[in-house]
Amino acid sequence: MKQDNGMTVTTATGTAAGAAQGADRSLAPVTHWRVHLGAHKTATTHLQETLTLVRPALAARGLDYIPNPLLRERRLARAIWKRRPLVRLPLIGPWQMREAIEAAVTPLRLGPQTVVLSEENILGVPEQVLRVPFYPQAEQSVTRLAMLGSKAKLVLFLSIRGYDGLLPSAYAESLKFRPPREGGFNRARLLASPPSWYDLVALIHRSAPGVPLRIWRQEDYRENAQAIMEEVCGLELGPLPDISDPSWTRSPTAEGIRAAEELDRTLTMVERRRQVGELYATAGGERFQPFSEAERSELRERYDADLARIEREFPGEIMRFPG
């Protein structure tokens, strides 16, 4: 433990096994879930690491932020989008799905009945940002996640980003987990059928009817990080530790991407992640940007049109900040 800017912070998250050993199995049930379900490459790592550092202070104030690495050790996302039996039955389904999510989270809890989760893999893995349709399993995942709202208050959070930056970043991230698809970054297909945040927001509302949704833009995050974290937590946070942007989330160069694409396709995921991380950290050259300036302008226009449509059809859901 250490003091930073007046707030007590912790420098380690521990492991899921360690958290489980210390968990009190007689914990009171969660009464309020606040869940950030994605998306990828929208400054999520900075938010997650900052809230992890102040977790003990938040718990003392009645809010439990569960660190993202622990959620991944417990395979929370997999519990949501891989579990299939009976989830559509009207009586058994909601109970069974809620139990699966709680089974992943309960061993990690510190005790407060308000729990905050941030796990962008709930929507899908990074490679699915590049699919048509965008995040193809999102409907199933959000429908199942919404079952938490049958016994507790539930608020969902979505972070979004302009397509001209999102698509190259998602491709770079996907190379850490699997070899590229045939042809690599399919620029022509993505320009012909780009993702749509409006479509995703509308899908979330259809899949989780009546559940509040709050949205922030990655472009707003750097200047408004604290306000966004306070919205996610539902608390005024006071001074927060100042952490630098994590180096492993910075955009790689075109040379780094090419080297990652050429790696042995039989590498294990662990070894692939290690080698890709090294390549991204050391390769020189220009930042990977596969779109021309005209194409980037077109993608920005589509993003602006989606934002306007979200504002029109779901007024007040996008967070706005002074200045």
Image (cartoon, rainbow, N blue to C red):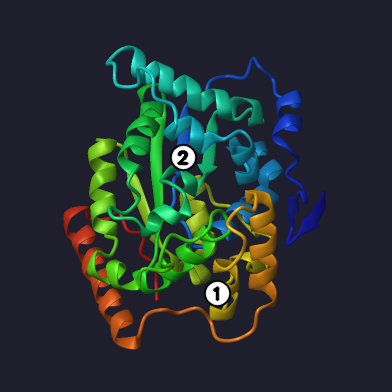
Q: Provide the residue designation for mark 1.
A: 258
Residue 93 lies, with reference to residue 298, above or below; the image says: above
Quarter of the rendering containing residue 137: top left
Q: Which mark is residue 34?
A: 2
Dot 1: what SS? helix
Quarter holding residue 66: top right
Disc nearer the start of the sequence (1/2): 2
* Residue located farthest toward the top when viewing the structure as drawn: 91
Percent x, y for residue 79? 49, 30
Q: Residue at x 55, y 72 (%)?
A: 257
Residues under numbered marks 1 and 2 in contact, where contact means CB atoms less than 8 Å apart: no
Identity of the residue drawn at 34% across and 72% down: 187
Which of these two is toward me, 26 or 238? 26
Image x and y of residue 177, in percent:
56, 54
Foreground residue among 233 and 135 = 135
The CA span between labels 1 and 2 is: 39 Å
Residue 304 appears left or right of 235: left
The image shows residue 211 at horizontal and vertical percentages of: 31, 37
Residue 50, numbered circle: none
In the foreground, 296 or 102 = 296
Mark 1 vs mark 2: in front: 1
> What amino acid is found at the position of numbered circle 2 in the picture?
Arg
Q: Given the image, on which type of amino acid does mark 1 rest?
A: Arg
In this rendering, is residue 243 above or below 203? below
Residue 258 shows in this picture: yes
Say which residue appears at 41% left-offset and 48% top-offset: 157
Residue 322 image point, x, y percent: 39, 71
